[in-house]
Amino acid sequence: MDSGKILSLGEIIRQQRLMMSLTQGELAKKSGVSPSHLGRIEKGERFPSARILRRIAGPLGFDENELFALAGYLSSPSPGIAEEGASYVGGGRLDPYVGKVLSQEPVEVQRAVIGVLSLLKGIAKGIPQERLKD
Amino acid sequence: MDSGKILSLGEIIRQQRLMMSLTQGELAKKSGVSPSHLGRIEKGERFPSARILRRIAGPLGFDENELFALAGYLSSPSPGIAEEGASYVGGGRLDPYVGKVLSQEPVEVQRAVIGVLSLLKGIAKGIPQERLKD
DNA sequence: ATTGACATTTGCCATTTGGCGAATTATAAT
DNA sequence: ATTATAATTCGCCAAATGGCAAATGTCAAT
């Protein structure tokens, strides 16, 4: 292997598998992915889907986010944190009281509430601004 | 919308799109994903690959990790939101999606949600238990 | 009612993924 | 050298994804 060469995902996966002293067959057993598919992934003949990546991450000792980033499915983690900050620009933060009240409800109810809110927003859109002042 | 039903990924995506006041065509332009594919995803006729999720996450205001977790591609939700969720633990857990949607709203709207919740509870009280099972 | 613009859905098909089973290669034992 | 076993690769095809173009639905204006 050429040390100056950027490794493809398949090469990284093969390298890591060998580091873990696993054959393709053993990794297949541990991950539930077929040996032939693993071989093709390593050779670059197939590109693994997210479902496959998730299955091989554990046995290969990868963090899922890391492997998804290597595959190009996720942006690199540190910009993600920046984005997270940006995603709160509008309202900023969640009202603590609202969060507390909702967290005591089942998930179905929490999401139902969001559905109703969405509906109300749609309806509120159709109300002229003058009427809103009444 | 059936309040007793867990939302599918497609339903979440549609809901979020409507929350952002986007048509499928507008989201298509912003994300580079075809309108027909978006429609099928929302209707549950197709399941989005990781590549598609990555492209729609930004325009829909999702954190990538969060959307991947909703799709079942990643096992852990976004750590940031999980931490925030933990700080509101009053006995339950706040759904990450719900927390995200609400944190984008002004505080007045967030607190209006409590009224909506009370309303739903009041309505549920007035419905005989047999009717709730339908 | 019709018409036009816009939004959504559907038909179709090219491409890609993923697994079964067979073929080939590699390795160890004799 | 041969033989047996393990490991990897290859042929093939079903299933799923994703986009183009057409069809259908919705809504507002006339």
Image (tube, coloured by chain):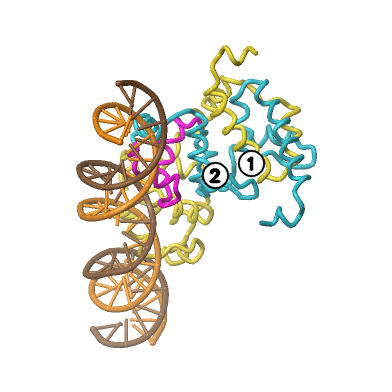
Chain colours: A yellow, B cyan, C orange, D brown
In the rendered image, which residue does mark 1 sit on? A112
Q: In the picture shown, does residue B12 fall above or below B104? A: below
Q: Secondary structure at mark 1?
A: helix
Q: Position of residue A118 (x, y in %)?
A: 57, 33
The magenta span reads B33-61
Which image quarter: residue B81?
A: top right
In front: B61, or A109?
Answer: A109
Which chain hosts label 1?
Answer: A
> Would you call the spot at circle 2 few (<14 residues within 10 Å), some (14-19), or many (20 or more)?
some
Give how far apart the Cα atoms at labels 2 and 1 are: 20 Å
Give, as a three-letter code, the residue at label 1.
Answer: Ala
Q: Main secondary structure of the magenta part?
A: helix
Q: Kindly identify the residue that appears in the image at 66 percent across and 56 percent down.
A: B134
> In the figure, A69 relative to A35: above or below?
above
In the structure shown, which secondary structural element does the residue marked by tag 2 occupy? helix
Query: Above or below — where is A111 with respect to B23?
Result: below
Whether residue A20 appears in this view of the structure is: yes
Position in image of residue A86 (x %, y %)? 54, 22
